[in-house]
Amino acid sequence: MDGHVARGYGSGRVGLGDRPAVLVIDFQGLLCDPESPMYGGEAVDEALSSTARLLRVAREVGLPVFYTTVGYRADARDMALWPLKVRHLPICVAGSRWTRIPEQIAPREDEIVLPKRMASAFFGTDLLALLNAARIDSVIVCGGTTGGCVRATVVDAFQYGLRALVTSSCTLDMDPLAHRVNLQDIDKRYGDLVELDQLLGELRMRFGNAAR
C-alpha cells in the first residue's frame, strides 16, 4: 500500500463549492510558443484545447474567470532569485511576445488578467481580495507549470480555505514526471484531481440552470 494512503493522506475529497471560479495560470507565450526556450512541448496543444473546453463551459454557466501572467522588467531587477534557478526566465519581459495569452484561450474584455512575479497566483497580487469580494469558495486551477505555479497556487488556495480542483489535461509541465507526481501529490494533500469530462458534467448539472 502507498505509504501516504496508509497514513491517511488522500482519504477525503474537498469537492466543488457553491461559488467556484476558474484560474488560468501563466498560459502564455513562454510556455506555449514553440520558439520559446521554455516551450512546454507536445503537451501544449492538448492543454490549450482542454482549457478552451473548460472555459467555454465555465462561461456558459456564468463562472468568473481570472488569468495570471508572469512578466519582468527588461533589466531583470524585479526578478529576485529567479535567474539563479530558471536560466531562460529573464527573456519574459512584460509586454513581450512571451507574456501573450494564446488566442484560443484568450480572456474576454470583462475578465481580469493579474500580473505576477512569483510562483503562486496569490503572492503579491490582488487575487485573494477579488475572490473574497465575489464570495468565491472554490477554484478550478489550470495552466502551467504543474510542478511550479499551479502547485504553488493550489497550496495557497488550500491555506486560504479555498477548495481547489485540477485536471491533468488542463495543466502542463515540461517534465512529464513532475507533471504526474505533482498532480498525485496535490490530490493527496491539498485538492482534488478530477477528469475534465466529469468536471464539465458537474458544472453543467449544478450551475447550468442558474445561468439561464
Image (tube, rainbow, N blue to C red):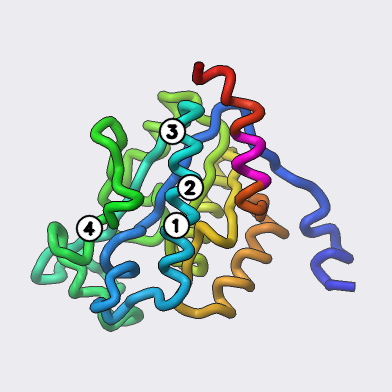
Give SS at disc 4: loop
**Range shown magenta:** 198-203
As measured in the structure, the alpha-carbon distance from the residue carrying label 4 to the one carrying label 1 is: 17 Å
Residue 53 is tagged as: 2
First reached walking from the N terminus: tag 2 or tag 3: 2
Circle nearer the viewer, 1 or 3: 1
Q: Name the amino acid, label 4.
A: Arg
Label 3 sits on residue? 59
Few, some or many residues within 10 Å of mark 3 (<14, 14–19, 20+):
some
The question of residue 39 being in magenta is answered with: no
Q: Quadrant of the N terminus?
A: bottom right
In this view of the protein, which residue sits in the foreground, 11 or 63? Answer: 63
As measured in the structure, the alpha-carbon distance from the residue carrying label 1 to the one carrying label 3 is: 15 Å
- Give the residue at x 30% y 47%: 106
Contact (Cβ within 8 Å) of mark 1 with mark 2: yes
Residue 100 is tagged as: 4
